Every structure is written in C-alpha cells, then in structure tokens.
Amino acid sequence: MSPSIPLQEMIRAIRSARTQCEERGVIQRECAVIRAQFRQSDNDGRSHNLAKLLYVHMLGYPAHFGQMECVRMIASPRYSEKRVGYLGAMMLLDEKQDASLLITNSIKNDLSHSSQYVQSLALCTLACIGSAEMCKDLAPEIEKLLRASNSYIKKKAALCAIHIVRKVPDLGELFARTARSLLAEKHHGVLHGAVVLITVLCECSPDTLERFRKTVPDLVRIMKSLVTSGYSPEHDVAGISDPFLQVRILRLLRILGRNNEAASDTMNDLLAQVATNTDSTKTVGNAVLYETVLTVLDIKSESGLRILAVNILGRFLLNNDRNIRYIAMTSLQKIVGTDNIAVQRHRGTIVDCLKDPDASVKRRALDLSLALASASNIRSMMKELLMFLSSCPPELRAETTSGIFYAAERYAPSQRWHIDTILHVLTTAGGDVRDETVPNLILLITNASELHCYTVHKLYRALLSDISQQPLVQVACWCIGEYGDLLLRGECREMEPVEVTADSVLEALETVLQSHMSTPTTRGFALTATMKLSTRIMDNVDRIKSIVSIYGSCIDVELQQRAVEYNALFKKYDHMRAAVLERMPVIDRNSPGHTNGDSMGGVIKELEVDKVKQRETLLPQLPANQVCDLLNLLGDSEESVPAGPAQGDTVPVQSITTAKPIGGELLDLLGGFEPTPLASGLSATPQIQRHLCQDAQRGSCFVRVIRMTLSACLYFIAPAVTVYEKNGVTLTLSCEKQSDSAVTVTLKGCNSSDSDVTSFALQAAVPKSVHLNMKAPSGDTLPAKGLAHVTQLVLLNNPNKVNLKMRIRISYSSQGSSVQDTVQIDSFPGLS
C-alpha cells in the first residue's frame, strides 16, 4: 500500500477485505506508515494522516499513538489542521489522560481568537473533554464569551458553561447573573442554551433556585410567544414552533414551580393554553403535551388543570403507539394516590391495556389496575384481575397474586367473597404465591366460624379435582383435619349437598401422601390432618393407625418424626389424644392481647407481677443466667410443679415449670429454642395447661406434637420498642438473639395517617467491628390508617461483643413532600 494513499482509498481497501485477518493486515500496514510520517518534522500531510487514524479508531483498533499529534496540530496556526486536531482530541483524549492537560493553554488562546470558528472549536472541545482542573482555569473565559455580541459564540459558550457547572458545581455562581440576561435574546439557539444552563444551576443549588424563581414571568412570556407565533420555516417541526425549546422551558418551569404557590399561579394560565392548543395528532405535539402534563402534576396547580392533565394522559392510553401508552400509565401511577377520582374515570381503558401483547405495557397496566382497586369497585376490578391471572405471562404471576391478595384483604366486601377469591387464585396459580399465603388463609378461615362448613366442602372438592397446586392442597388438608366432622355431615346451605364418606376423605389424604407432586411440607399437612381425623371419625381409627405407622420409617426425617410421635400418641397416651388433637381455637389478631409494644392494661400488669412473685417463690435456686426452653423440659432444677389453677382461671405459659424429662438429650425436642415473652394478656386454656404439665412430668416423646398444637393457638411476639414516630409514621424495633454474636433485628414501619406513604426506605449503620446484612424489605409503601406494614430484617454479627449501637436513616414521601430523618439506637430490647 502506498504511503500517500488518500483516506477514500484506505476506506475502500478496508471494506473490500474478505476476512477479518485481511482487514487487520491492511490497517496494521497503514498504521505503520502513519507512525513513520508522524516522526518526520516536515510532514505536510499531518491532517490527512490523523484523519485516517481517526477512521481506524472508529473501527475499534488502537490509535493512542496519535494523541501527541493531536496536541501539535491544535497549536498549529492553520484552521484546517486545528479542526482535525480538535476532532482528534475529542475522540482520542479524555479528562483522565495527562495529555489532555497539554492542550489547556491552546484552548485558552483559541477562546480569544479573532475567528468565531476557531473559538467554537475550543468551546466544543472543552465542553467534551474538559476536566475539573481545566474547567476551573477556563471558567472566567467562558463567562466573558457569554456576554459576547455574537449569537453563534453565545450558544457554544452556554453549552460549555453547562459542562463546567456539572463538573464543578461551585462555579455555578459565576454564570448565574449572565445566564439570566441571556433570556432576553431572540436567537433560539441562545435561548435553548440559556434555559438548559439555568436548569442545571437550579438543580445544583437551592439558593440559586430561589433566585431564578423571579424569571418565571420571562419564561412564560417566551413560551407564549412560541405557542402563538405563526409559521416559521426555520423553527417549525410538524406544525409546532421549536418544540425542543418548548420542552426545555416546560422542564424548567416544573423545577421553579415545585412547592411554590406564587410561581405555580403565574404559570397556570400558560399551561392551560399549551394543553388545549397543542396538536396531539403528531409525535411532536405529544412530546410537548407530555411535558406539560408532568409540569402540571408536579407544581401546585389548580384542580381543574390537574383534571385536564389526567384527561390528556387518558387520551394517550388510546394512542396506537405503545411507547405513548407506557409513559401515560407510568405518569398515572405516580398520581393515582392524590388524584384517584380523576384517574378512576379511565379505569376501563387501563384494564383494556392488560390485554396488550407488549410485556412492559402489561406490567404497567397491572400496577395501575391494582392501585385503582377500592371498596366501591373491588368486585368488578377483581373479576378483571382474575381473568388476567388466568392468561398472564409466568413472570407476572407472582406479582399479580400478591396484588390480588393485598386488594382482597383490604377491600373484601365479605369473608365468603374473600375466601372464594383466594381459593380461585390458589386454583389458578397456586405455585406462584408467596410462602405466607397458606398461614394467612388458614387464619382467615379460622376466624370465619360461620363459613367453616362451606369452606371445607369447597376445599375438599378442589382437592379431588387437582392436587398439583401445593398451597391449595396444604390449606385443604388443614381444613379437612380441623373440620372433617362438618364434611361428613353433608349439611352445607351454601353448596349442593354431596354425600361424603369417611373412606373417601381418607383416600383423598392418602392420595396426597403418595403423590410424587407433593412436597415434604404438603405431606406433613396431610399426615397431621389424617391424625386429627382420628378424633373426628371414630369408625376408621384402625385405618388411620396403619396410615400413620407406614411413615414411621419414611426417608424424610420431618415426616418420620411426626409419624413416630403420632404412633406414640396412639399407644402410650391414647387418653390424651382427644385433647391434644382438639380443634384450634378462633384467633383474633385485633384483640388487645396481641398488641405489640410495652403498653398493657392495668389488670394484666397486676397479674404479671403476681406470676413473677410466684416464680420467684417456686424457683429460689434457679441461676439468673440459665436459659431454659419454653416448658423447662431440660431444666437442671428440682421438680417444681405449681398448684393447678382454679376452674376458669388462665395462667400464662411462662409461669409453668416442669420436671426433668426421662431420656436426657434424646427428648430435647425444643433444644436451642430461646424463650420469647408472650404478648400482654396472652394465656393458655386450663385444659391445655393441664395436659402440658402431665406430659412434662411423664417425659413423653411427643412434646413436638404439643408444641405444634400450642404454637398454632398462641402468638409469640418479641418485645418491641418504638424508635421513630412522626407524621403518622411509626417505626418499631424488636430483636432476637440467634447466638452469642448473632442478632436478628426486625424493623417494622406503619402509617396511621389518612394518606399513603410512598418511597419508604431504611438505611442502617453500625460500628466497624459489627457486620451488618440488610435483607430486602417487604415493600416500599405504607398504606393509610395502618392497613399494612413494611418489615425490614437486619442481621448483625458482633464477634468482638462490642457495645451494640445502630443509626437508622428513614426516608419517605408523604403528601407530595419528601422526609428524611435519622434516629440513634443505643439499647436493644430482648438482649441481655
């Protein structure tokens, strides 16, 4: 290849290469020639060679050896060489390379050059690769050019000033006064640069933002002239006069009018004029309308103007362009909490977007549909959401089920409707629900005592038709075990009476136990249900014994342990079987006994004081640092059994002390379980207490059965303290000690105000020697009036056992304003 080959010939040779190896050979030969010519001092083709090198760089090949040639060409007095040199500097250099500092003096000299084109080259280069040091050195020169008489230079200088302010925010004060004077220019390029510069200045400094609020009338005047001006071929785009400048002005107005009523009132009329007069049939008009809507929704605008903005977004939902529909739903999602009534008018269109083939549009439509659910429309919205669940893509099912469960729990018109809705979800997408769904549904069924017969019949039929949905099968097994007697009666007013026999029920449970689709957890539910039926089906006890005994040698340890304990209950403790397997009591989550915190009633306090005194009397020699399990099964103290309570009395389980069991560690079924104080007022029934004491004295091996029964009856709530309370937002903290050095901290946020709290986030800091691991929070929204809470788990590892402290930063948005607070925690409840 000839050394003097022109750029066009080199491009043609590279493109004609048939293989990558051939292309690489052409480029390597040409780069060798370029290097050789760079070494020559009297090279007349330097700009030509650098242009070829820049093309090689664009193809991805190394061209760093041309950096110094760029520096030399920038210092050249010839404009043709300066142009290529500045272009090479912008492509081959960046602020991290030392070579960029060598061109600082050349840029400074060219900024004061007599030719506007040389000045523009220096301005563009500084705006592209200017480092913080270069910006500090050359900022005064840029400020002078902003006051020049040439509009071409003013426009370039404004763009360069934007880069300087972003790179060094402290230099913003230098350009503030000059930037405001640029708003009087008539050249659209200068105006565009001035508006962007003012926007960057306002974002960098709150003080500057307050100062520029005085420019709102000037911006309104410029915007009105653009809206009302006639046809201008220089600035017209699809019938809109300079839409780029309009969009920039609207963004600046949004920043200036945020949280300021005076500025918002000044621009209200303008925004209404733009919203009504802009053509929405073209993409350009939609861009201006979208920025107008965002401005209206972000400032303190009038209610009528906000309704107009929501209606514009409603029209966007009918647009054929999916991108426009997507941004419309994204905007509606942000305001659905404050302008719910206006958004509700477009509910039908939003629901129709659930059928859109685009996955992103579907997801946004789902989020918005769930946010629109209310007590007045829950039935119709739930019907649409259930239809969507049956056909939604797999990646959206988990999110859809969670949203349906939350909406059903919050706005359920009746308990039966609530239960039917959850069962429908479990039947349709049971494999995609969260783990807490099963216990929550069980609690709901337990509290709906008048629907026990209806629920068990419906779940039994669902179990016969499909056992692939594991959460549904687990709930069905639990209900059959609890309410099997109601199932056998066949008396259900809400459903057609179907004759159910004891054998058919046991066959259904055996099918679950033997199915390959059943998980170990599901088999555990089925085995426990079979055991419970032994007290409800008196004629088939032998068959139940045989079923339970089969799993005494199961390979699954959990299932084997259950079967062994149940067999022991049949053989040695048959007289206690009916009491141990009796029906679970109704649990009221809203009862005073489940209040989380330090407060409790006066009567409860007196009872607890009496029980503490009784324990001190009964256990005078118990070491203070001894850690016992819940029933003191492995306590080393002498047998001390308090006198039985009188009929009708209730005694907290914490006050029960029992004898040392036979078998030592073999019977340590509760080993490693640290006692957790019961919630205030929580107590066990005398019948359960009597059986627990009898069992502990005899050292039985089915303590696990009693523990499972008791744990289903009682809630054990770790002591919690309130660490933050402001604006209706309450943050409580509870601790659980996992080992000598490991602690689990649970932070729970709740909102008692009348409006939802969004963007709720927690950050934590601990001493350097403590290792902190924050799990993902359960959500970022706190519904109003304490309808739900957000939980955050924090795992702390304190190997050096230093004094544990934690600092928590709380941030959230309430009624359109952002709040951020910090609290210091010096003591942790429940830790010795």
Image (spheres, rainbow, N blue to C red):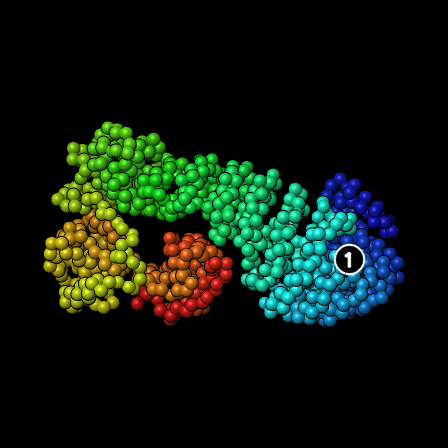
**Residue 461 placement (x, y as % from top left):** 31, 32
Give the residue drawn at x 25%, y 57%: 593
Depth check: give the residue in front, 96 or 443. 443
Give the residue drawn at x 18%, y 39%: 535
**Residue 331 placement (x, y as % from top left):** 55, 50
Apparent side of residue 757 relative to residue 278 in the rendered image (left or right): left
Residue at the extreme top:
499
Q: Which residue is mark 1?
A: 87
Give the residue drawn at x 52%, y 40%: 349
Label 1 secondary element: helix
Q: Residues within 10 Å of mark 1 (few under 14, many from 20)?
A: many
Q: Quadrant of the C terminus?
A: bottom left
Apparent side of residue 300 relative to residue 167 in the rendered image (left or right): left
Q: Is residue 333 above or below residue 216?
A: above
**Residue 227 placement (x, y as % from top left):** 69, 52
Q: Is residue 36 above or below residue 431?
A: below
Apparent side of residue 412 relative to residue 70 in the rendered image (left or right): left
Q: Is residue 803 visible?
A: yes
How many tags in the picture?
1
Looking at the rendering, which quadrant does residue 540 occupy? top left
Report the amino acid beneath label 1.
Leu
